[in-house]
Amino acid sequence: MNAQHATATRPRHGAPVIVDVEEAEAALVENYPHLVRLAYLTLPPSLGRHRRVLTAHTLTQGALPRSPCEPDPAVADVAGPRGTVDPAYALVRQEVLDTALAFGRERGWRGRLRRTLVGGPAPYVLGLRLHTKATGTDEAELDRALSGLNAAGRAAYALLELERPRHADGREVRRLLVAAGVADPRGALKAAKAVPEGLLLGGSGFDPCTVHARPTDLLRRRQHVRVGLIAAGAIAVTATLVAVLTGGQDPYAAGGSPGAYGTAVLLDPAKLVRVKDTAWTRASRVDFTAWPTRGGRAGDRALLGRAMAVWARPSARVSVSATQGTAEGLPVQQPQLLYAGDLDGATVVLMYDGLRLVRYAEPRDGGGTAALDFARVDGAGVTTAAVVLGRTDGNTRFLTAPWVTEAASRDLRDPGRAPAKLDRTADGVTEPVRMPGADSRPGVCGDTWPALQFRAAGGLGADRPFLLTDLGDLVPAHLTYQPPAAGAPLEATGPTALANVARTACNLSSMSGLGTRSVNVWRYATQRLPEDNGHASWVCARADTWRGTDGRALALFLPPVSDPGTPGAPVGQSGRDGGACGRGMPRVLAGALWKSTAGHWYLLAAGSRDVTRIKAAGGVTGTSKGPTMAVRAEQGARAELSAVLDSGAALTTLR
């Protein structure tokens, strides 16, 4: 019996789960960049970069079912990259995996037929060659290693690095491979684990959604005059359509056409999706699709036409920005209008295209430059409850989610001060909120760190107030707290949580501008200090991004202090890592030199709960059983720390 038959006869548990087409579409759109990357990494390198990029998009878009269907029960409960089980995501993930693996298996006329048919109705490009961005030395080395694997090995590696399975032995990955018909899933998993850790998979060299375009053979194309005339005619027709849709010349939009007729329809302001005020109370998804259309100029078609025209072709008078990992470009589906109105000397239009928030802002007096900002927000939830509408003179105004029932501001550096009520307009726009660091010199924390504290309507899964902090992106980051014994992060609004966040606040600036989705402050250890100097805490602040990669971890040492807002001392930081201090790697080790009140120096070290032994070598030597260590040292001494986990594995400090 082959692997496919074995999967088909696996007994089912519980009632079948039927996924309708709308649910599958929502899962595909929310996870589109992730699924395209999975397909791209699994496809054979022999396709070439251009064909591989297009095929990855084709296979992913083709994963949408034509009718309601049941996901494979053998893998329907395998969690996705954010650790949640979603049958709709499981359905499209398995389809992408199946078709990408089939590309590597099928040979002969069947393989040639599939390669021909797959270039059909999905992405098709004339006159351009597409390829992922140029890679550095490390990325090129990883690419060569992946090229040495077969399709099953590449798929296993991609699943391990992108899906972040809960179990280190990769049992979820084996189940996915078996369901896809892989004959030797254990062998594929073993080969994948032999490749160096894929910390660079999140880079642009492996992102088929961020590509370079180059022309094809220009001399050969010049011979095809007839084709060129036809294309010119099509462009002229589309340009006429866009001129009609936008109402004429726009000072902020570049001339020309944004593309084909289908794109012109997506950019038609009359076709913007509009949601009613109370739609969120009946919505099955609490994300931006449930946000209503608000703002005093939501009916201004001329304004909306300018916004869409600039989205299509921004001119040199437009400042375009995007958070890391966010593609700049045309909408991927009919955009939804969230807000349009006048705000502090500017006119703002906020839209959502299923993957990204897009904010257009123009001066109300018609002078100066306009702005076009993109921010990736796939997988948003109830705590994604505010969006930056505008910043003026160190102040920020936010548009709040319709389910926010209480809004307040609070100073993270003063945990004992009660939050202050935050006034909002009927449209959900806040009064100005001071930006963190606005009143201090560059590089200096300042005396305060303003943050938002919201409470959501009941029944949405957010029973406690939650904190958001402005880190310079379009969407503020969700702040959470995790005590040593907790299995999952908690809302950072309790007294102990606020005390630990207060001493971490000044270090949040190191996580700004990364496209940060959330920051979890994990108090992983408490240590009794030598000479009866009290107790110190060790925390690891973990920033996770909207793209699911390039997270950052920062270890901090918090000795006893009299001022509760005294910043902790940074003692270790990871670069673009694979999950340190996060769900996939809930362990950490850090050390610090500390001076007692009597003037004696010590090397202190602390690890997470699974650390059984710590060793110091170099300028300071010593060992200690358990997760903490204190060894007498000289001022300025340097040492290398290592630890052993209860599993027997080794652990080093953050680097």
Image (cartoon, grey):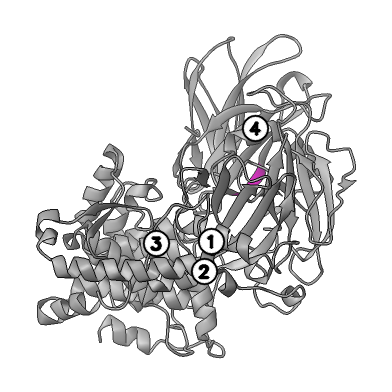
- Specify the principal SS of the magenta part: strand
Which amino acid, by three-letter code, is at mark 4? Asn
Mark toward the start of the polypeptide (4 vs 1): 1
Foreground label between 3 and 1: 3
Q: Secondary structure at mark 2?
A: helix
Cα distance between the residues tagged 2 and 3: 12 Å
Is residue 520 magenta-colored? yes
Q: What kind of residue is marked 1?
A: Met
Residue on which disc 2 sits? 245
**Residue 73 visible at all:** yes
Check the image and report above or below for 190 versus 91: above
N-terminal of the pair, mark 3 or mark 4, is 3
Secondary structure at badge 1 equals: helix
3D distance between C-alphas at marks 3 and 1: 12 Å
The reply to whether dot 2 and dot 3 touch (C-beta < 8 Å) is no
In magenta stretch: residue 101: no
Residue type for callout 3? Ser
Q: Is residue 491 above or below residue 653?
A: below
The boundaries of the magenta stretch are: 517-522
Q: Is residue 364 above or below residue 96?
A: above
Question: Which residue matches tag 1?
Answer: 308
Q: Quadrant of residue 60?
A: bottom left
C-beta proximity under 8 Å, tags 4 and 1: no
User: Which of the numbered marks, if any, corresponds to residue 507?
Assistant: 4
Q: Earlier in the sequence, mark 2 or mark 3?
A: 2
